[in-house]
Image: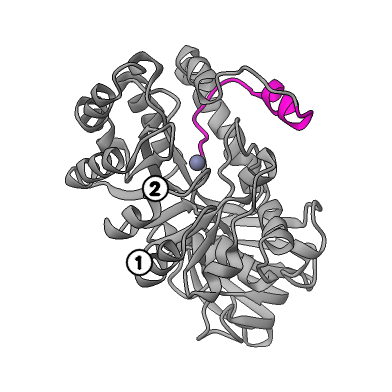
């Protein structure tokens, strides 16, 4: 195993209060030692031990690699026309998710994998080192399980979302589709997945259906996460807390009871501002959640329909500008918050023993992520201790 010491990091965020200042555990003039795939040492640059290799950060800021805990990257096709019509204020008779389902079913394994790899590489270049991704554009036993099989070759954080929408093949009999999702399809998908998810929303799955789907998954050893309260108020958030889901994702329309439930449980509220941006919808109120003591994560929701961005940098800028998060809170949510939304303690922080996932920014501090929106500030990325191109 090779060790590397990265010296002269102007401003390092560790997300470990024991390592430095404040909740972000900031260290000025810092160094990090990587040993193999893990962080071996963090501290002041002047105290850094020797290593096999040295890298001079030349005063750049360092942050933990982003943990993107919500994306939909196993898909084919494109929905440019739908987006364009929405931005032009025209109604558009498209199939929405069904358009992507059709294209995904028609694609070969190789096409789906090449598409996934392309977006993972795109995200990595922008500092994302942990990715969750979902099925949900197959909606048959064959197509859902192949999506998860492909995803599982590229990330450990794989989510079975057979319950994205009721399959068009079952549109007249949603109960039969729920039976499929909780039966044969679950059996075929569970070996490739760590998580089960459901789109609990009017027009998708109601509270009872969502409960049946999540508990069936839990009985097969999958852990729960929920698409909840995105478009309207609904039972998703409280169901997520009740079933100890790791995360309730979206959380745009919340009652006071929903906020109280999130504050009292172990469920992270994952906010996905790319979706509100791309659909010109109301922003989730991060400030309200944070002030109530809720743990908040930020994620891209990268998907071809409602949020076609792989950029955590962009999501941080939106969260600070439009969701009333501070730059410190937004960075924490995009790193440690995402890790908590995936129930991980080895990523999202730079502390000895954690995975050596970090990024250097062409900036004096992480505040520039929001201060300089749209600028590609990530200049070097290490994932599992390896510097990625
Ligand atoms: Zn989603």
Is the C-beta of the residue carrying label 1 under 8 Å from the nearest atom of ligand 1?
no
What crowding class fits label 2: few (fewer than 14 Cα within 10 Å), some (14-19), or many (20 or more)? many
Q: Residue at x 76, y 29 (%)?
A: 89
Q: How is the image coloured?
A: one colour
The image quadrant of residue 105 is top left
Query: Residue 224, relative to residue 190: is it above or below?
Result: below
Residue at image mark 1? 266
Q: Is residue 73 magenta?
A: yes
Say which of 373 and 325 sits in front: 325
Q: For numbered disc 1, what is the local secondary structure?
A: loop
The spot of residue 368 in percent (x, y) is 78, 66
Q: Check the image and name the residue furthest to the left.
A: 219
Q: Is residue 299 above or below residue 22?
A: above
Q: Residue at left 32%, top 40%?
A: 193
Q: Position of residue 191 (x, y in %)?
A: 25, 36
Which residue in the structure is indicated by mark 2?
226
| Front residue of this view, candidates 8 and 50 | 8
Question: First in sequence: mark 1 or mark 2?
Answer: 2
Residue 168 rendering spot, x and y as whole percentages: 40, 17
> 155 left or right of 302?
left
Quarter of image, res 365 = bottom right
Q: Residue at x 69, y 70 (%)?
A: 327
- Asked whether residue 209 is in view, the answer is yes
Q: Is residue 218 left or right of residue 130?
A: left
Along the viewing direction, whichever of 241 and 117 lies nearer the viewer: 241
Magenta highlight on residue 357: no
Q: Which residues are magenta?
A: 72-89
Q: Residues within 10 Å of mark 1 (few under 14, many from 20)?
A: many
| Residue 78 against residue 256 in the figure, above or below | above
Secondary structure category for the residue under label 2: strand
Q: CA distance from mark 1 to mark 2?
A: 13 Å
Residue 367, x across and y down, in percent: 74, 70
């Amino acid at each position: 195993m090779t060790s590397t010491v990265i010296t002269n990091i102007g401003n390092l965020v560790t997300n470990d209060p024991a390592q430095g200042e404040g909740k972000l555990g900031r260290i000025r003039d810092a160094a990090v030692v990587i040993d193999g795939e893990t962080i071996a040492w963090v501290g002041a640059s002047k105290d850094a031990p020797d290593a096999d290799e040295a890298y001079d950060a030349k005063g750049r800021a360092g942050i933990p690699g982003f943990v993107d805990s919500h994306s939909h990257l196993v898909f084919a096709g494109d929905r440019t026309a739908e987006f364009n019509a929405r931005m032009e204020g025209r109604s558009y008779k498209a199939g929405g998710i069904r358009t992507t389902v059709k294209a995904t079913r028609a694609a070969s394994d190789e096409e789906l994998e090449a598409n996934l790899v392309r977006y993972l590489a795109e995200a990595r270049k922008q500092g994302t080192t942990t990715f969750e991704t979902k099925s949900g554009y197959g909606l048959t036993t064959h197509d859902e399980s192949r999506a998860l099989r492909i995803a599982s070759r590229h990330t450990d954080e794989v989510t079975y979302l057979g319950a994205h929408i009721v399959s068009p093949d079952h549109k007249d009999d949603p109960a039969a589709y729920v039976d499929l999702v909780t039966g044969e399809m679950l059996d075929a998908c569970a070996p490739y997945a760590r998580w089960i998810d459901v789109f609990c929303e009017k027009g998708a799955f109601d509270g009872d259906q969502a409960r049946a789907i999540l508990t069936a998954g839990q009985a097969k050893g999958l852990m729960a996460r929920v698409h909840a309260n995105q478009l309207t108020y609904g039972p998703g958030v409280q169901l997520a807390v009740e079933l100890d889901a790791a995360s309730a994702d979206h959380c745009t329309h919340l009652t006071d009871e929903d906020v109280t439930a999130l504050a009292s449980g172990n469920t992270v509220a994952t906010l996905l501002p790319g979706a509100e941006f791309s659909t010109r919808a109301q922003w989730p109120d991060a400030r309200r959640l944070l002030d109530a003591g809720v743990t908040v994560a930020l994620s891209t929701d990268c998907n071809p329909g409602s949020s076609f961005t792989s950029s955590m940098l962009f999501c941080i800028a939106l969260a600070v500008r439009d969701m009333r998060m501070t730059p410190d809170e937004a960075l924490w949510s995009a790193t440690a918050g995402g890790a908590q939304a995936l129930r991980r303690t080895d990523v999202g922080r730079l502390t000895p023993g954690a995975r050596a996932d970090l990024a250097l920014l062409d900036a004096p501090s992480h505040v520039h992520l929001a201060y300089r929106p749209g600028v590609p500030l990530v200049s070097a990325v290490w994932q599992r201790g390896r510097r990625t191109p």
